[in-house]
């Protein structure tokens, strides 16, 4: 099995009437009573209708103005009073149905770092599943692992695959499936943890990293966005099993979505990170980095973290959003190589990364 290892992570560095007391005949009384009853019924019906109408109106108003400040939660635009807006009103995907930050916070008590996941390579993306367990891609081991949030125990989600390497991994909340990118042959597969993996698309250039797009990301909401070795960016529709090329650049290695739906892509060979719009437009976010590798964005969307290799020493730095001010972070035990270094930031502001020797490590970013 040939190993591909060159630089940071690519082949070369570059969501009623009143009773008045008057007596009357029985017929008059009955007529009067019936009239009152009908009047009361009509009045009650009108009152109920008005009340229902007012309630519906209030409900509609509440739905349209979740933030109370004129913004509409779920429209994909980060308005005043919203902590996030990922283009949908579905909870459980990092941004709640009221546009509040949500997410998994890894409890270090029962499973302190480092957590040994497997032997061998340190590459492969990581992600949280619905229960906040950690999913880990083992690039050269050809396995996907689940690390229990309860006790830190490690289990296989898939056994060995026929593919050469698992390069990317993402969890899709809308269907509860794990999606992986593989190299040799190049493919995107879905994994349910019970049945054999299912190939969605095959034959693309080497995929290096994948992420699930928020609903507001152009025509590609809730699809898988994939960056490849040759600089191509694809959208994979899991329902249709289709592949769409929507951007071409160079030197790509990794990607991450911010809570407001902005897509950030790493261009390792250019020492820069760009934003990428659904129409394929690239815009510079920051440059002057030394072999940038994996990236992660904190749940409130105010910082981007990047792993890179200045002077051959692994380090994870913080870069503020949107003004792109870099704050140097700690040295870490990651190594340059062909695939991306997996990393994420949890709801407690802990950065979790896959380090050398395939162990999960972490540190507080406060």
Image (cartoon, rainbow, N blue to C red):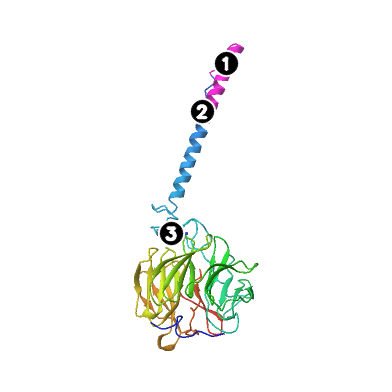
Residue 199 seen in render: yes
Callout 3 crowding tier (Cα within 10 Å): few <14, some 14–19, many ≥20: few
The image position of residue 306, as x and y in percent, is: 43, 77
Residue range in magenta is 20-41
The answer to which quarter of the image holds residue 231 is bottom left
Residue hosting label 3: 219
* Chain-order first, disc 2 or disc 3: 2
- Name the residue at 50% across, 59% down: 96
Magenta part mainly helix, strand or loop? helix
Q: Is residue 234 above or below residue 72?
A: below
Report the front residue among 235 and 172. 235
Q: Is residue 293 above or below residue 131?
A: below
Spatial separation of the CA atoms under disc 1 and disc 2: 18 Å
Residue hosting label 2: 43
The answer to which quarter of the image holds residue 12 is bottom left
Spatial separation of the CA atoms under disc 1 and disc 3: 66 Å
């Amino acid at each position: 099995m040939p190993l591909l290892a060159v630089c940071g992570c690519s082949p070369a560095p570059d969501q009623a009437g009143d009773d008045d007391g008057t007596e009357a005949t029985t017929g008059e009384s009955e007529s009067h009573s019936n009239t009152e009853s009908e009047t009361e019924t009509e009045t009650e019906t009108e009152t109920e209708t008005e009340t229902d109408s007012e309630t519906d109106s209030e409900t509609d108003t509440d739905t349209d103005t979740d933030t109370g400040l004129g913004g509409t939660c779920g429209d994909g635009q980060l308005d005043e009073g919203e902590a996030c807006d990922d283009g949908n009103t579905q909870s459980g995907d990092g941004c709640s149905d009221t546009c509040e930050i949500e997410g998994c916070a890894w409890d270090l008590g029962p499973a302190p770092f480092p957590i040994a996941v497997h032997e061998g390579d340190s590459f492969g993306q990581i992600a949280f599943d619905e229960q906040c367990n950690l999913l880990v891609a083992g690039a050269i081991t050809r396995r996907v692992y689940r690390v229990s949030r309860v006790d830190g125990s490690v289990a296989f989600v898939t056994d060995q695959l026929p593919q050469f390497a698992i390069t990317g991994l993402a969890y899709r909340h809308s269907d509860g499936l794990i999606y992986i990118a593989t190299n040799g042959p190049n493919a995107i597969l879905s994994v349910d943890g019970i049945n054999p993996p299912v190939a969605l698309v095959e034959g693309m250039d080497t995929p290096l990293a994948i992420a699930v797009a928020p609903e507001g990301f152009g025509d590609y909401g809730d699809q898988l966005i994939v960056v490849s070795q040759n600089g191509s960016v694809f959208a994979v529709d899991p329902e249709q099993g289709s592949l769409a090329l929507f951007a071409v650049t160079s030197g790509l290695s990794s990607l991450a979505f911010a809570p407001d739906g902005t897509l950030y892509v790493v261009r390792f060979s250019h020492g820069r990170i760009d934003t990428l719009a659904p129409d394929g437009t690239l815009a510079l976010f920051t440059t002057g980095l030394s072999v940038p590798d994996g990236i992660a964005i904190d749940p409130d969307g105010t910082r981007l973290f990047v792993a890179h290799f200045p002077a051959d020493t692994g380090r994870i730095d913080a870069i503020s959003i949107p003004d792109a001010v870099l704050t140097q972070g700690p040295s870490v035990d990651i190594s340059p190589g062909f695939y991306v270094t997996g990393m994420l930031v949890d709801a407690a502001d802990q950065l979790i990364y896959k380090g050398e020797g395939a162990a999960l490590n972490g540190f507080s970013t406060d």
